[in-house]
Image (cartoon, rainbow, N blue to C red):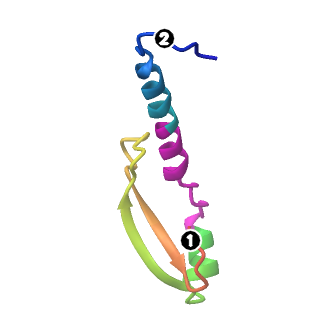
């Protein structure tokens, strides 16, 4: 527990606590679960041939852990499922 300062100089402690809590909250809110991956052969045989694909969009990967593959395909099926 923080003891009160008689000169009221502990406002910085509360500001730091509020900043840390705010950043943690923003991190939790902005976290996006990664989409499941699908192999091309499975995608082609199970979805594309059967006309179950609604939309395919190519997006730049924000994580960029790999410099060779820095784009990804986001596939939306007719039933709303995303890959």
Magenta span contains residue 77: no
Q: 51 above or below 21?
A: below
| Label 1 environment density (alpha carbons within 10 Å; few <14, some 14–19, many ≥20) | some
Q: Neighbour class for label 2 at 10 Å: few (<14), some, many (≥20)?
A: few
In front here: 26 or 16?
A: 16
Residue 4 screen position, x and y as percent = 53, 14
Residue at image point 41% right, 10% down: 7
Marked residue nearer the N-terminal end (1 or 2):
2
Above or below residue 78? Residue 24 is: above
Residue sitting nearer the eye, 41 or 71? 71
Residue tagged 1: 82
Q: Quadrant of the N terminus?
A: top right
Distance of mark 1 from mark 2, alpha carbons? 55 Å
In the rendered image, residue 55, in percent from the top left (x then y), is placed at 45, 80
The picture places residue 59, in percent across and down from the top left corner, at 37, 62
Location of mark 2 (residue): 5
Q: Nearer the viewer, residue 70 or 23?
A: 23
Query: Split into 4 quadrants, where in the image is the C terminus?
Result: bottom right
Spot the residue most to the bottom.
51
Q: Where is residue 17 in the image (x, y as percent from the top left)?
A: 50, 28
Question: Mark 1 and 2 residues: CB-CB less than 8 Å, in contact?
Answer: no
Q: SS of the residue at dot 1?
A: loop
**Which stretch is magenta?**
22-40
> In screen coordinates, is 63 left or right of 41?
left
| In this picture, residue 61 sits left or right of residue 46 | left
- In the displayed structure, 65 sits above or below 77; it is above
Say above or below: 4 vs 27.
above
- The residue positioned 47% from the left and 67% from the top of the image is 74
């Amino acid at each position: 527990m923080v003891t009160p300062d008689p000169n009221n100089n502990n406002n910085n402690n509360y500001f730091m606590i509020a900043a840390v809590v705010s950043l943690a909250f923003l991190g939790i809110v902005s976290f996006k679960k990664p989409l499941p991956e699908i192999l091309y052969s499975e995608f082609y045989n199970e979805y594309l041939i059967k006309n179950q694909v609604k939309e395919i969009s190519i997006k730049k990967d924000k994580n960029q852990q790999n410099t060779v593959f820095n784009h990804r395909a986001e596939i939306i099926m007719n039933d709303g499922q995303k890959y």
